[in-house]
Amino acid sequence: MSLDSSQKCDEETGLKSMAPEPLELDESYQTPVDIRWGNCYPLFLKNNIPKIVIGPHWPLFICAYSLFVAASIFLIGWHFTSTSSEFIKWATFLVCVNQCWSYAWVALINPGVINYDKNNQIETRTRCAPQLDMQNDSKTWYCPKCKLLQLHGTVHCSDCDVCIQEMDHHCPWTGKCIGKGNIKQFYYFLASTLIFMIFNIIASLTQLDGALNGTRRKIKQGN
């Protein structure tokens, strides 16, 4: 359907779309046969909504996550064996576990792939239909790559090859995009990473300082 024909239909019906941009449906538009996930890999779907979505850059996520896990195991083992402070022991455990969990959380949940067209069963209809104009005014554009009508604020990611609702950016370290579905978890992960680094630097310096003081006392006693 061309833009001119859609405008003509609006004039005939007397209805005005509330969308800031017109729906530009071209000849390639058709009701999608299946859900589109692009280069992402959905797992554990329920009503077309996955519990886990793995992005195209999952190898980078695996590498970074492995480093966090290895660092956490080392720090927990070190503090549990070298300090008598119960606070440092369990604080290190909680901070490290929280860091690994928050990273996995943001990297595995759906970033905002909604497949709005398919999930809402929008069949091939003309834009001049009053029902389409009145009930679907929040859709502002048609993605020719996904062949789906998309909500306002949805952006097509070239890396994931799929549309992400309220996309913020594509993060290769989480393996996929950061969008409406995981933006809050992403900020939580950033805060957790900051706490992880600051706490472990301070705790490690405290441990080293205590070890050095203990060595100095032994040297003085030996003399």
Image: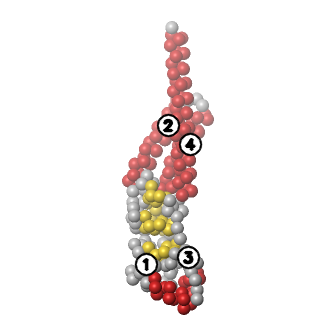
Please say whether residue 119 is visible from this viewpoint: no
Q: Position of residue 43 (x, y in %)?
A: 45, 64
Under mark 2, the amino acid is: Leu
Of callouts 4 and 1, the N-terminal one: 1
Residue type (three-letter) at the residue carrying disc 4: Ile
| Whole-percent x, y for residue 23 in the image | 49, 78
Task: Name the residue type under label 1.
Answer: Pro
Asked whether residue 88 is in view, the answer is yes
Which of the numbered marks, if any, corresponds to residue 19?
A: 3
- Kindly state the secondary structure of the residue where label 3 is placed: loop
Please tell me which residue lies in front, 50 or 200. 200
When the figure is inspected, residue 1 is found, relative to residue 61, above or below; the finding is below
Q: CA distance from mark 2 to mark 3?
A: 53 Å
What x and y, as percent, mark residue 78? 49, 33
Above or below: residue 218 compared with residue 129 = above
Residue highlighted by disc 1: 32
Is residue 77 depicted above or below 162 in this figure?
A: above
Q: Is 92 in front, or is 209?
A: 209
**Crowdedness near tag 4: few (<14), some (14–19) or many (≥20) residues, C-alpha within 10 Å:** some
Q: Nearer the viewer, mark 3 or mark 4?
A: 3
SS under mark 1: loop
Taking depth in this image into account, of 223 and 173 the one nearest to the observer is 173
Real-space CA distance between mark 3 and mark 1, rounded to the nearest whole angstrom = 23 Å
| Label at residue 195 | 4
